[in-house]
């Protein structure tokens, strides 16, 4: 019988995260005055130990034992060979996936939620606020906070709050509080409601609310937490790629192609950055983040300085952005409905080290259904975008008659997103592709922003 | 750091199932004439290769390679030490759980769905019918049938069909058809609807419908499949206990106590039977199936001959039963709402080799929430009954000041059952305990049935 899965023992789990800041050049975040933002400016929002990680130039950063002990609940995650999908596609490619769906909330998100909760805890923080779109991040942080005895409050984009009641239930099972956003609890929320009492909400508004709720707590014991985009978040996710590398090594494999979906960039970075490191050091390897055609940040939007949130509370970040006021079409991959892209991932795209691609919603679901019927697991809508990319590459390998090793990140299961599959089967899912007019309208927002420099890391 | 999980490699996965029929004596199933049922009587319902397994006296039965290749998708499943739960309970007990929630449908059910689909396939069967209560079994069979290219039709108890739309979506994602039961497609369904057009349905009615749909297909290419109760189903589940034994051996442990929840008996038998084998051969070990106080088959009902379904299509089985007409109270552990108990498990209880216990719904949820807040994973409502038992035993170990090894079956996750957790948190879940009057009313149904003999296996 052919080997299907590769496990690592807990003793083989990586003891350090890989920090890509040691290997690429990046434009600094800017404050409202156009000047680079320093650690102190961020202190009301994040605990200083995480701010230090955010700007650290060290290539390898130790994972604390207390964090490893919680990651142990589900890590190391299995590496699975998609033998049945290969057979179905009749491809000479060997397809491997990293199964990040085995965590308690069912996605890769707790890889950073756990260290974030830990660093807040040892910094003396008692409460964390955050936002969530589809709900993956909010439930991951709720889980992590319950492990370290921290209070957790989640502002959930209202349309998802209404569509996905199970996500709220999950957060509550772990003791967190989850409320629909915009809410009446913050200025940002009240302003949004005043503008449109029936607004479905957006990730940008929810981020504004969560930041405001953190910085306005007079006790100083509350901080904010973000589930993607920032350097320290991507850093924590690199455990995925570091494990995958060890697992592939055990069976004498190394990927020719690395694929993951990308919304804010964290699951992509988590798998890809350790391989980007190899590429920077001379390895030949193709690395593709896949984004939705409905929210084509990297494939269509400009590389600009923009805010991470709608109310413009965050510093200006150098990134691909559709504009902080952009409200993405209602595709069912909530985790990919973000107007920007992590600065680190954006930098790699700008430099041509990685190549962004997009797929439509229907292509993604079609791929997800093929995966479910071959490999068995039902994927998150976000993950389906990566699978569509894998199928594209596997077909290409067939056409070229080339043996190829494809590695991708199976970032989470879709068991709480099944309503969207229903719609797909009922023919009620549609493709949204951003028009040029929408792009132009969206870009106006950058006119008064500074422009990032084009940097070269190598 | 303390070891949290023990993995087995695929090469270490058991190659044979353990058949308890080699080690215990059992009363035969009886036909309507009161005579033992032979293999030929069952031929319209099950394929002959599974009927042969049902009555096989062989202690070890080979697992076909084609079955192993599919079980490989998620097996061997991790053995996890519940370090945080131990700490929370301040117990000297060491608690281990077998995580059966890592399968694509999220429970132990595919352990038998996969071989059942396989044996039907090689027997030339093209379509399988079944029933499902909570939905775990129906989705497991849908997954298994998709792996072997077999059509699958699931009669789902109507109240669950309405409450849990995600379960239907899962089955459809794997290409199966799922309809609410009672339906107008069968005599049994039409009779139930005539009696009460608004009936919530029951597992007993759904079983009748699925059997009728199978045997009435004139092509002869349709068979019925059951997810619990029968010998061959329990046989397939023993891979759980066989793996657990190997995993514990790797770290020099052996259980003093084995616990699982029990509805029809399959997840309990899967973990426990390999240890029952040891007990029969002299090992000291306490083995406890936990059932709900609302449906107390083993702890309150008589050991009788009764039908497995409401319409009395099945043979008379020797088992603990609340009566085939019994409709269990609406507790949120659908998988435990069955009037009977597997004959093999019943026999072990009758002989005193294992000892059945019960917990109330609220005790079960309380235990499940404690587990989620310590071990992270959110459990299926059924599984919560096992956790309540584990906590009871761990507290006893503390009182006695005894180091004890407790092993239990974490039979599935509760991510599709979160609505019930909501009700628990809202104080809207209630305890149901069967009264003596209800018991007496229920027992009348057995008056015309033969009585099973009291057999002794050792």
Image (cartoon, coloured by chain):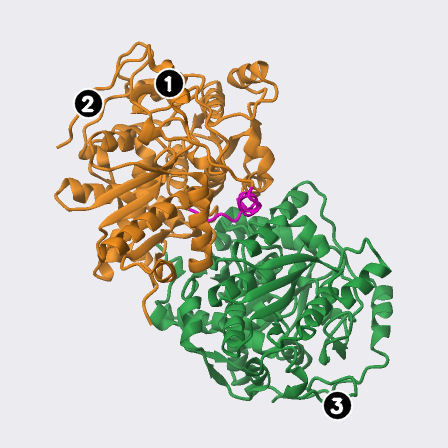
Chain colours: A green, B orange
- Which residue carries the number 1 mark? B440
Q: Are marks 3 and 1 on the same chain?
A: no
Range of magenta residues? B412-427
Residue placed most toward the observer, A274 or B309 = B309
Quadrant containing the C terminus of chain B is: top left
Chain identity of mark 1: B
Question: The residue tagged with tag 1: helix, strand or loop?
Answer: helix
Instruction: Kindly identify the residue that appears in the image at 29 percent across and 28 percent down.
Output: B343
Residue B454 bears which disc, if any?
A: 2
Instruction: Kindly identify the residue that appears in the image at 49 percent across and 47 percent down.
Output: B414
Neighbourhood count class around disc 2 (C-alpha, 10 Å): few under 14, some 14–19, many 20 upward: few
Mark in the foreground, 3 or 1: 1
- Which residue carries the number 3 mark? A35
Neighbourhood count class around disc 3 (C-alpha, 10 Å): few under 14, some 14–19, many 20 upward: few
Residue B350 colored magenta?
Answer: no
Residue A48 % position (x, y):
58, 83
Measured Cα–Cα span from mark 2 to mark 3: 87 Å
Q: Are marks 2 and 1 on the same chain?
A: yes
**In the image, residue A308 above or below residue B38:** below
Measured Cα–Cα span from mark 3 to mark 1: 82 Å
Using the rendered image of the protein, determine whether residue A283 is visible from the camera's viewpoint.
no
* Lateral position of residue A438 relative to residue B305, left or right: right
């Amino acid at each position: 019988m052919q080997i299907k899965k590769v496990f690592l023992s807990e003793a083989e789990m990586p003891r350090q995260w890989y920090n890509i800041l040691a290997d690429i050049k990046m434009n600094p975040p800017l404050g409202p005055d156009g000047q680079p933002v320093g650690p102190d400016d961020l202190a009301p929002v994040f605990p200083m130990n995480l701010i230090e990680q955010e700007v650290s130039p060290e290539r390898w950063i130790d994972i604390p034992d207390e964090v490893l002990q919680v990651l142990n609940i589900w890590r190391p995650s299995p590496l699975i060979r998609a033998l049945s999908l290969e057979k179905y596609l009749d491809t000479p490619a060997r397809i491997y996936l990293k199964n990040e769906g085995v965590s308690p909330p069912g996605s890769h998100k707790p890889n950073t939620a756990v260290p974030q909760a830990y660093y807040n805890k040892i910094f003396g923080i008692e409460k964390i606020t955050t936002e969530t779109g589809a709900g993956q991040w909010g439930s991951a942080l709720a889980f992590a906070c319950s492990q370290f005895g921290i209070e957790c409050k989640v502002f959930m984009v209202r349309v998802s709050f209404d569509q996905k009641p199970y996500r709220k239930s999950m957060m509550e099972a772990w003791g967190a509080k989850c409320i629909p956003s915009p809410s009446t609890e913050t200025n940002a929320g009240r302003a949004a409601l005043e503008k449109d009492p029936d607004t479905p909400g957006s990730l940008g508004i929810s981020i504004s609310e969560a930041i405001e709720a953190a910085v306005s707590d007079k006790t100083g014991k509350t901080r904010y937490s973000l589930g993607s985009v920032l350097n320290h978040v991507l850093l924590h996710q690199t455990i995925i790629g570091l494990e995958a590398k060890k697992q592939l090594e055990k069976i004498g494999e190394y990927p020719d192609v690395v694929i993951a979906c990308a919304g804010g960039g964290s699951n992509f970075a988590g798998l890809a950055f350790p391989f980007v490191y190899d590429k920077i050091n001379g390895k030949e390897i193709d690395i593709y983040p896949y984004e939705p055609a409905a929210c084509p940040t990297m494939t269509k939007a400009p590389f600009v300085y923009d805010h991470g949130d709608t109310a413009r509370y965050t510093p200006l970040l150098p990134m691909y952005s559709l504009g902080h006021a952009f409200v993405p079409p209602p595709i069912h991959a909530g985790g990919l409905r973000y107007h920007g892209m992590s600065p680190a991932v954006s930098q790699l795209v700008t430099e041509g080290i990685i190549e962004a691609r997009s797929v439509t919603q229907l292509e993604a679901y079609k791929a997800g259904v093929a995966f479910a019927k071959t490999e068995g697991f039902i994927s998150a809508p976000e993950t389906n975008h990566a699978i569509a990319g894998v199928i594209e590459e596997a077909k290409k390998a067939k056409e070229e008659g080339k043996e190829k090793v494809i590695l991708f990140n199976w970032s989470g299961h879709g068991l709480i997103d099944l309503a969207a599959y229903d719609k797909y089967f009922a023919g009620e899912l549609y493709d949204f592709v951003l028009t040029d007019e929408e792009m132009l309208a969206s870009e106006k927002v950058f006119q008064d922003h500074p422009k990032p420099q084009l940097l070269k890391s190598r």
